[in-house]
Amino acid sequence: MNQTLGDKPSGELNNKDFLPKKVGIVFSEVKREYFPTEVQYITEKDAEHDANIIANYIRKLDIEVTIIPGDENVVETLKKEKPEMVFNLVDSIKGSEYLSAAIPGVLELLGIPYTGVDILGSSLGYNKYLVKKLLQTGGVPVPNSQLFITPNDPLEASMRFPLISKLNEIHGAVEITRDAVSENEKHLRDRLKFLISTYNQPVLVEEFIVGKEVVAYVLEGLNRKVYLGEKVFNKPQDKYVFATFEDQWLTHDNEVAKEKLPYRYEKVEDNVLKEYVKKAFDLTKMLDYGKFDVRVDSSGRYFFIDANSNPAFGPLEIETAMSYILNLHGIDFPEILRRLILNTMRSPVEDYATNHSAVTQISQ
């Protein structure tokens, strides 16, 4: 018995049969006045440029692409353009990262499949302290930490210097400078005053873990895989070795020789860490793809220091860590796109596979 899907026999079907004909890319609408500081603006200023580069890769898959800003007209634009699925690349709305959770809500209401986290996962991702507590409760190791609502909150007796201060609701290494690490309480208080008054949000303070840093990416397709890359620093650093905002945003391959870059990635295989990453992915309600930064101390103990749902996305020319690390594992950007599209549109694939299996059994 020859089961068919549409006009094609089952033996002629391949992944291309399940690719959408039209895809939307929704990106952050970015204006300098939306952001309290230049450094936060820098993390998103290229949003439209990057969306257009990604669109060109999708077009090579013979898919029509429409580019849509995540602004107040996004609903009307989506209704007009009618994409079959959307790449959700919105990191902020009017400069507020936590408002980006509105985009999955809009897509859910319109019934449009999309890449990345849903409303819950997006909302969780912009509360770093809550994420750390979820990971800790679920058995994923994290550094000892404390959330400061005001600069004068008492420092818990369990906290041990050196301590590193991070904005609780903003990603992109914003304000992760050499001054982010405190060796005494006076420095910490000064740091807290600056961050809280400038960004009007709580600050996560955690014990700084001395050791190497591994970046982990989860990518879902028809299965889930974890890819690891270690940050290997190319030049001597200060007492504390970590990637600063300047390292990540202000130094690029097209500006300096590779040997002068602050760090490079090297491929890592660690099955124990991969299992922790998979658990962390589920605990933080991520979907499709996600990124975790993990410190490994001299004793080989893991400490999850950051979790990013919908992390920076794009090919090597956009210089995303995702493409660098997956490329080390033999996964190029077109393959990343293909996996995410199939994962987002995979219900027809799964339905067909189930039906075909049942029909095959009956025919036998």
Image (spheres, helix red, strand yellow):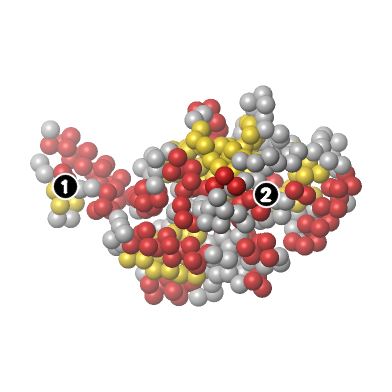
In-front residue for pair 18/255: 255
Amino acid of disc 1: Glu
In-front residue for pair 26/312: 312
In-front residue for pair 364/37: 37
Residue at the disc numbered 2: 244
Quarter where residue 102 is shown: bottom right
Q: Position of residue 304 (x, y in %)?
A: 63, 38
Residue at the disc numbered 1: 12
What crowding class fits label 2: few (fewer than 14 Cα within 10 Å), some (14-19), or many (20 or more)?
some
Residue at the limit of the structure toward the top, as seen here: 299
Query: Which residue is at a point 26% across and 52% down the rendered structure image?
Result: 16
Q: Is residue 293 visible?
A: no
Is residue 71 rendered to the left or right of residue 129? left
Compared to residue 91, the image places residue 235 above or below, namely above
Query: Which residue is at a point 66% across and 61% down the rendered structure image?
Result: 40
Quadrant where the image shows the C terminus: top left
SS state under label 2 = loop
